[in-house]
Amino acid sequence: MNIIFAIIAVGTIAAAVAAMSLRNLVHCALALTVAFAGLAAAYLQLGAQFVGFTQLLVYVGAVAILIVFAILLTRGSEPPQQSVLSSGWPAGIFVTVIVLGVLVYAIGKSSIVQAAAPAQPEVTVRQIGDALMNKFVLPLEVVGLLLTAALIGAVIIAMKEEGKK
Amino acid sequence: MSPLAAYLILSAFLFAIGLAGALTRRNAIIVLIGIELMLNAANLNFIAFWRFSDHPEALTGIMFVIFSIGVAAAEAAVGLALIIAIYRHYKTANVDEVNSLKG
């Protein structure tokens, strides 16, 4: 528990709350980008440099741009006139409070979280590449196939509907 | 509070914020953003457990997060394509008004 973790935690949670509660969707997307960057800082703080920079590339770079494009294509940039909350929102808040309570209770009661922190592990990108090309080569191929299928599927889904009256 | 517990609590709060957004907002894009936040909270748990495990040199946590980021990127692309298709059909991205499967 140090001051850097406190800054990262407060910034990330504030940005996440803003992303979920602002009325203007473009502001939501920008706050979400800040939350993703805060998570990348948390990964760097935990000694997972490769994952931290992957998070920056994929989320702060690609996913944020994708979300902004979707918001602009669906004309979500104009603030809504009516309420931003869906009809069943009290039930949603109720479920959320229960989930958060159970999680915090479980973390507080757990014995494994009491262990002292071991020394910072040294992981080089070379080790990660070795593992990806040897031990984890099958999952890597499967993810490549999945990404290809998702790319083609996204294009087909978003293509203009044809043969419709 | 130990460092691991602090990261797990941070992750639990991020998960709860994402869940609240996914369950209470009416715009489909915000629902998808909430799901992305929940996925990221799970990734933070993986990295925290990897960092404070006894054998971090096995790299299991890092590998899981890398594949999870890849799957989440695919999910975001397909989800946003679905939202654009729904918007083109219903002229709205409001999840309350999208209430029929074959319209």
Image (cartoon, grey):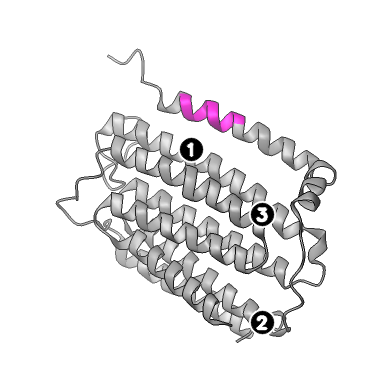
Q: Residue furthest left?
A: A81
Q: Which is more toward the observer, A6 or A157? A: A6
Is residue A109 in view? Answer: yes
Q: Is residue B20 left or right of residue B2?
A: left
Of labels 3 and 2, the one closer to you: 3
Q: Residues within 10 Å of mark 1 (few under 14, many from 20)?
A: many
Query: Which amino acid, mark 1?
Result: Ala
- Residue B59: % across, % down: 77, 58
Residue B47 lies, with reference to residue B69, above or below; the image says: below
Residue plotted at (62% across, 50% down): B68
Q: Position of residue A50 (x, y in %)?
A: 66, 54
Which residue in the protein does label 1 denote?
Answer: B77
The N terminus of chain B: image quadrant: bottom right
Placement of A71 over or under A119, stated as above or below: above
Does any portion of residue B26 appear in the rendered image? no
Q: Residue at x 71, y 69 (%)?
A: B51
CA distance for labels 1 and 3: 23 Å
Residue A118 location (% of width, % of height) = 76, 78
Decide which of B58, A6 is in the foreground and name it: A6
Amino acid, disc 3:
Phe
Q: Which residue is mark 3?
A: A50
Residue on which the image places disc 2: A110
Residue A119 in which image quadrant: bottom right
Q: Say which of A47 and A145 sits in front.
A: A47
Q: Look at the numbered discs 1 and 2 and tell me whether their residues touch, using CB distance below 8 Å.
A: no
Q: Is residue B83 magenta?
A: no
Q: Main secondary structure of the magenta part?
A: helix
- Residue in the image at 36% along x and 51% along y: A29
